Image (tube, grey):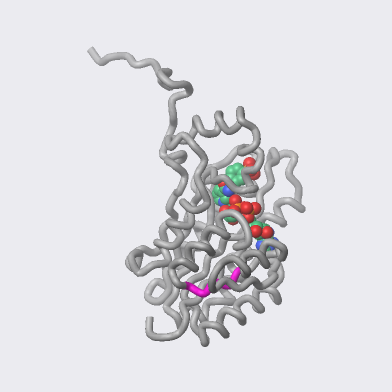
Amino acid sequence: MTGGARVAVVTGGANGIGLACVRRLSDDGFTVVVADTDAEAGVRVTAEIPRAEFVACDVRVRQDIDRVAGTALEIGRGRLHALVNNAGQTARVRFADSDETTWRRLDVVNLHSVFSFTHACLAGLTAGRGSVVSVASVAGLVGAEDLSAYSSTKAGIIALTRSLALEHGEVIRFDAVCPGQIATRMMARVQTDDDLRTAVAAQIPAGRLGRPEEVADVVAWLLSDGAGYVNGVAIAVDGGESAGFRRLKPGVALHDHTPAR
Ligand SMILES: NC(=O)c1ccc[n+]([C@@H]2O[C@H](COP(=O)([O-])OP(=O)(O)OC[C@H]3O[C@@H](n4cnc5c(N)ncnc54)[C@H](O)[C@@H]3O)[C@@H](O)[C@H]2O)c1
Ligand SMILES: O=S(=O)(O)c1ccc(CO)cc1
């Protein structure tokens, strides 16, 4: 890159995984435009993190998105170097009990926003030869019980990421990260209920929930020149949870072992 600030946009950057990405990208020298509905947390981000600028934005609203893209392009003088599509919401409900409102909310916040933000930033990303990382989920790689609407949006993000990598691969890289169970407020119940946390941890080879910073590390790497030949991938950041079946209990195999004769 020659001259000028390296500029990144992080959606949902006021809390959780997005906030960890903002901190990490600031450490890496980016000027970071933080787009979030949470103005209280956004003001703290601007005050505490060097080169971070908060712009109030609901990712469902195109005018808000255009304002964020405009701010970033002004800072980068027409060039944008990184976009992290991270804003997301969840809904835990049986498919039979789910309704239109829930499906539309998750579709618009989680998936349609990736289209809108990427579309609004495309010219700047082209000029800056930038990269995009979208935050999907392991629930988009496999299914997830009681999370059918959520997991569908995350699978959509992965498919969109791969399609864009094919269309723009000479200039812009598009990748996704697929976090497993990360200790943020989205996982508040798992963090406060000891029995639940123990049961969840037993499903994860790492034996614990992940930290937001562990996702941010992978996002920062994907945005870096070190990942310059990586494009169209969806990387699980899940302590091994999606690698396969686990034993039900320590020392108890899934199947009886019958030695071959
Ligand atoms: N925590 C996990 O275990 C986990 C696992 C897999 C994927 N994810 C994904 O990671 C991303 C971040 O989740 P998190 O765990 O940090 O959650 P979080 O609730 O801590 O943070 C989400 C942020 O997004 C913002 N946001 C929500 N709706 C918005 C909207 N309409 N417009 C603008 N901002 C909005 C919130 O204000 C918040 O700052 C989400 O896409 C989520 O689906 C999380
Ligand atoms: O809605 S939640 O049950 O809290 C939930 C579970 C898993 C994930 C992984 O993306 C997100 C939300």
Farthest left residue in view: 261
Report the image quarter containing ligand 1: bottom right
Q: Residue at x 52, y 51 (%)?
A: 212
Q: Residue at x 61, y 82 (%)?
A: 70
- Say if 13 sits above or below 103 in the image: below
31 inside magenta stretch: yes
Q: Position of residue 105 (x, y in %)?
A: 71, 56
- Say if 194 sits above or below 115 in the image: above
Quarter occupied by residue 57: bottom right
Quadrant (top left, top right, bottom left, bottom right) of the N terminus: bottom left
Q: Residue at x 52, y 74 (%)?
A: 31
Q: Position of residue 53 (x, y in %)?
A: 60, 73
- Say if 162 sits above or below 53 in the image: above
- Nearest the camera: 161 or 188? 188
Relative horizontal placement of residue 172, taking residue 19 as reference (left or right): left
Relative horizontal placement of residue 101, taking residue 45 as reference (left or right): right
150 inside magenta stretch: no
- Say if 109 sits above or below 130 in the image: above
Quadrant (top left, top right, bottom left, bottom right) of the C terminus: top left
Q: Position of residue 145 (x, y in %)?
A: 61, 38
Task: Please report the bounds of the magenta region as a residue range.
Answer: 30-34
- Nearest the camera: 76 or 135? 76
Farthest front residue in view: 48
Q: Position of residue 159 (x, y in %)?
A: 50, 58
Q: Residue at x 50, y 30 (%)?
A: 202
Looking at the image, can residue 152 be seen?
no
